[in-house]
């Protein structure tokens, strides 16, 4: 694998896959940030050997027996090695003990169904009961339609839990990565103390294609990127992936 | 406006009307009218007792269905409307203010689908922009501060998906509403009176009591959009509507709705007054039952209710 070339979708330059992986899926040539598997995200952020995973075994019940969902789940599990679209647990970041959840876009677009909702809720509760700062890294197309009303209700679930956390004294730092949309953006990902976004990430409520189709509006260059959201006052900082750990250590230093 | 599946009903009604004009004293015609009336009743029962989920969605969207304005005018003795989000503007896709309902002072909020073309357009067909969501947030805060129960009438295709809505933080505004509902220390009573489209609807129905009219719906996505994304075929909307389990009875079964208010035979759009009366009766009963409830209990129950919704299993532990 190490000798394999690939072409960057963003700059069209050939890059070594090995180099791309060593840089946590950031193009060495143009710095484009590709989605990052949750396992790598945790390796990127946590102090070596400190991550303790929780709730790995949670799986969805496919409550609506939705056509095609079973196959999609099986494929996603195989592709990602995960049971659903989030990994969660505790770890240390620069010596700060935190509760951490990272969504994984490879698993049905990082969409939020019962398992994502439940594991995010449990991570928030862990932060509350153990008095830990909370960091959630989002990457999601939104709600998981295959779970119908259950997926919509995960927005309510994470919100009622997060509301309690926010009344405590510990910080919640939300990291938005490419892409973060829909029910995830419209629930736990944006009601944070601090919002950090990765460069060039697409972040919003409705996707650009949906907006163009329904309103026939032409959308400006860079619409819904992190830079656009920062300009509109929606995120605090844009931080390069390879500087993210250091950035979190700094902000945790101020808040704990 | 006539829905396709209502055609037999409307045709019978038309013929009855015509015969009435002609009949006069004619026994024969009177008998025919009586026969047709029986047939009409039969047709209504046949059609309306076998509605598919997608037909219910169409009824929920019917332009003549009673909407926020009709309920406000019929049920609120004194509606003192409040406007604006104090940041950007006033979005009339949602309206709200103080109201007296069956002797209770409340904060009444609802999506306003308008009464005619002009007001429908002005209210963006009940699809709120962020300033609408933030107005609602203000109203939640006011209700909490002054101890007034919240009565929320849900009737929206969804929060608006548009350029300006994104520029002003639509997702942020919805998230803030959910967070506000999670902790507002007064009774929250939601009624889905028509459409319950996704996050925009949810921002008004994280509640202590969720009532649904028989032909209303609540869904994570519109069936048409679901069909085109998942089935890659927008013409399969009826199938998507069935698969999404979005009807009032589905939602009651899944613990999302507490109560289904039956609509008069033929649907709310054909008997608006009767429908509003039934919602009013339920509202009166629910407001009465929450009167004097301790806010800590309310908040704990609300938390526990939404905390427990999910369909996950512990395959194994590590």
Image: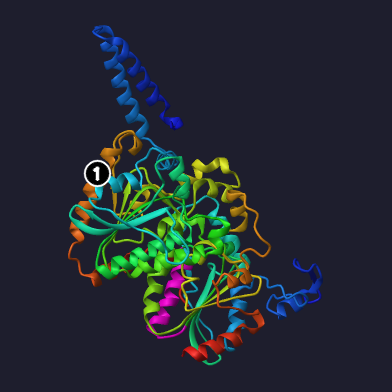
Q: Is residue A63 at least partly visible in the picture?
A: no
In the displayed structure image, the side of residue A14 where residue A202 appears, left or right: left
Total labels drawn: 1
Residue A120 inside the magenta-drawn segment: yes
Q: Is residue B193 at least partly visible in the picture?
A: yes
* Quarter-of-image position of residue B18: top left
The residue lying at 53 percent from left, 45 percent from top is B224
Residue A127 inside the magenta-drawn segment: yes
Relative image position of residue A84 (x, y in whole percent): 53, 67
Magenta highlight: main SS? helix
Q: Residues within 10 Å of mark 1 (few under 14, many from 20)?
A: some
Relative image position of residue B265 (x, y in whole percent): 30, 34
Q: Which residue is mark 1?
A: B278
The residue closer to the viewer here, A250 or B98, is: B98
In the displayed structure image, the side of residue A254 where residue A38 appears, left or right: right
The residue lying at 24 percent from left, 67 percent from top is B147
The answer to whether A186 is drawn above or below residue B21 in the figure is below
The answer to whether A233 is drawn above or below residue B44 in the figure is below
Relative image position of residue B16 (x, y in whole percent): 33, 18
Q: How is the image coloured?
A: rainbow
The residue closer to the viewer here, B6 or A226, is: A226
Relative image position of residue A79 (x, y in whole percent): 63, 66
**What residue range appears in magenta?**
A114-133
Letter of the chain that mark 1 sits on in the rendering: B
The residue closer to the viewer here, B18 or B293, is: B18
Secondary structure type for disc 1? helix
The residue closer to the viewer here, A78 or A181, is: A181
Give the quadrant of the N terminus of chain B: top left
């Amino acid at each position: 694998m190490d000798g394999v070339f690939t072409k960057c979708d963003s700059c069209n330059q050939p890059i070594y896959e090995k180099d791309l992986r060593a840089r946590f899926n950031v193009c060495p040539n143009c710095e484009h940030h590709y989605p990052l598997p949750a396992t790598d995200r945790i390796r990127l952020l946590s102090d070596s050997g400190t991550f303790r995973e929780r709730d790995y075994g949670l799986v969805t019940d496919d409550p609506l027996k939705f056509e095609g969902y079973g196959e999609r789940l099986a494929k996603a599990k195989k592709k990602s090695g995960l049971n659903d679209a989030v990994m969660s647990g505790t770890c240390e970041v620069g010596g700060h003990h935190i509760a951490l959840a990272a969504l994984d876009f490879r698993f049905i677009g990082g969409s939020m169904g019962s398992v994502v909702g439940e594991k995010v809720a449990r991570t928030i509760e862990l932060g509350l009961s153990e008095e830990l700062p909370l960091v959630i890294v989002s990457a999601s197309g939104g709600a998981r339609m295959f779970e119908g009303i259950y997926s919509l209700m995960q927005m309510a679930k994470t919100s009622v839990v997060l509301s309690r956390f926010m009344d405590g004294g510990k910080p919640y730092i939300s990291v938005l990565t490419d892409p973060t949309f829909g029910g995830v953006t419209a629930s736990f990902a944006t009601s944070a103390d601090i919002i950090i976004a990765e460069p060039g990430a697409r972040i919003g409520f409705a996707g650009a294609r949906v907006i163009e189709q329904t309103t026939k509006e032409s959308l400006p260059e860079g619409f819904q990127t992190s830079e656009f959201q920062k300009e509109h006052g929606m995120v605090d900082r844009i931080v390069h992936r390879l500087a993210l750990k250091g950035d979190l250590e700094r902000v945790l230093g101020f808040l704990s | 406006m006539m829905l396709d599946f209502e055609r037999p009903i409307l045709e019978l009604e038309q013929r009855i009307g015509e015969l009435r004009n002609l009949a006069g004293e004619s026994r024969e015609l009177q008998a025919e009218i009586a026969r047709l009336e029986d047939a009409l009743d039969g047709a209504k029962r046949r059609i309306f007792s076998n509605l598919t989920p997608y037909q219910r969605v169409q009824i929920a969207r019917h332009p003549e269905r009673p909407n926020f304005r009709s309920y406000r005018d019929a049920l609120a003795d004194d509606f003192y409307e409040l406007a604006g989000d104090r940041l950007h503007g006033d979005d009339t896709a949602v309206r709200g203010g103080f109201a007296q309902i069956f002797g209770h002072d409340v904060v009444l909020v609802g999506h306003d689908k308008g009464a005619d073309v002009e007001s429908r357009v002005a209210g963006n067909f009940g699809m709120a922009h962020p300033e609408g969501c933030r107005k609602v947030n203000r109203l939640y805060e006011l209700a909490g501060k002054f101890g007034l129960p919240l009565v929320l009438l849900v009737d929206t295709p969804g929060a608006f998906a548009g350029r300006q809505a994104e520029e002003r933080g639509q997702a942020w505004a919805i998230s803030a509403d959910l967070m506000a509902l999670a902790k507002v220390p007064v009774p929250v009573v939601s009624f889905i009176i028509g459409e319950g489209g996704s996050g925009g609807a949810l921002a008004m129905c994280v509640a202590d009591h969720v009532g649904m009219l028989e032909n209303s719906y609540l869904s994570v996505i519109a069936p048409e959009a679901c069909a085109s994304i998942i089935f890659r075929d927008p013409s399969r909307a009826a199938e998507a509507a069935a698969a999404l389990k979005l009807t009032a009875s589905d939602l009651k079964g899944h613990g999302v709705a507490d109560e289904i208010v039956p609509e008069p035979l033929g649907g709310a759009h054909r008997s608006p007054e009767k429908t509003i009366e039934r919602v009013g009766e339920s509202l009166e009963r629910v407001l009465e039952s929450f009167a004097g409830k301790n806010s800590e209990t309310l908040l704990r129950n609300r938390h526990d209710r939404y905390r427990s919704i999910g369909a996950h299993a512990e395959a194994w532990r590590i």
